[in-house]
Image (spheres, grey):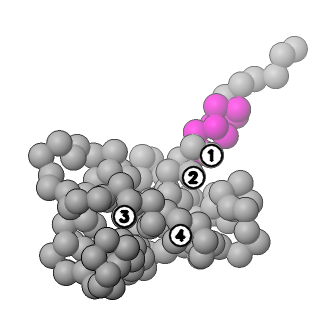
């Protein structure tokens, strides 16, 4: 089983299921896998192009370039020398709004939120009661 920062993916899923209400405002939430994240990004980019050029299209090379940048940005990896397409900030806003309005979370957001939850839980667990 894969291990992320000492926690298995199974532990992360269990933590998410126990505390899903702290992640979402909705009773039902869909967690996006990589394929759904890529599709949401493609739709966001097409919407951005429609706003600026009138066409609801986007090239695959632009989607993949933006996908790489998005993953690096969300995972806090270096992005200094990476190419990014014009109006990336607008695309990112459309992407985030799309997920929010669809009651969806992507895997990276779930991972980050579970990390915060488990680190908070471990901090509380390490505090011994005062005698």
According to the picture, the residue beneath numbered tag 1 turns out to be 117
Answer yes or no: is residue 29 visible.
Answer: yes
The tag on residue 3 is: none
Query: Which class describes the residues within 10 Å of circle 2: few (<14), some (14-19), or many (20+)?
Result: many
Viewer-side residue, 52 vs 76: 52
Q: CA distance from mark 2 to mark 3?
A: 26 Å
Number of marks in picture:
4
The residue wearing badge 2 is 114
Mark 2 near mark 1, Cβ–Cβ under 8 Å? yes
| Magenta highlight on residue 121 | yes
Q: Residue furthest bottom?
A: 56
Q: Is residue 46 left or right of residue 13?
A: left
The residue labelled by disc 4 is 99
Q: Earlier in the sequence, mark 3 or mark 1?
A: 3
- Secondary structure of the residue carrying tag 3 is helix
Q: Which residues are magenta?
A: 118-125
Label placed on residue 91: 3
Instruction: In this rendered view, identify the residue nearer to me: 129 or 37.
Output: 37
Question: Contact (CB < 8 A) between labels 3 and 4?
Answer: no
């Amino acid at each position: 089983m894969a291990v992320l920062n000492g926690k298995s993916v199974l532990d992360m899923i269990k933590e998410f299921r126990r505390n899903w209400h702290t992640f979402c405002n909705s009773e039902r939430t869909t967690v996006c896998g990589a394929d759904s994240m890529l599709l949401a990004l493609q739709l966001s980019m097409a919407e951005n192009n429609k706003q600026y050029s009138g066409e609801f299209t986007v090239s695959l090379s632009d989607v993949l370039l933006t996908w790489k940048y998005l993953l690096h940005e969300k995972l806090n990896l270096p992005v200094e020398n990476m190419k990014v397409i014009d109006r990336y900030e607008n695309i990112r806003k459309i992407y985030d709004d799309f997920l929010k309005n669809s009651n969806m979370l992507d895997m990276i957001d779930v991972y980050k939120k579970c990390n915060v939850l488990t680190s908070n839980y471990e901090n509380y667990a390490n505090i011994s009661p005062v005698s």
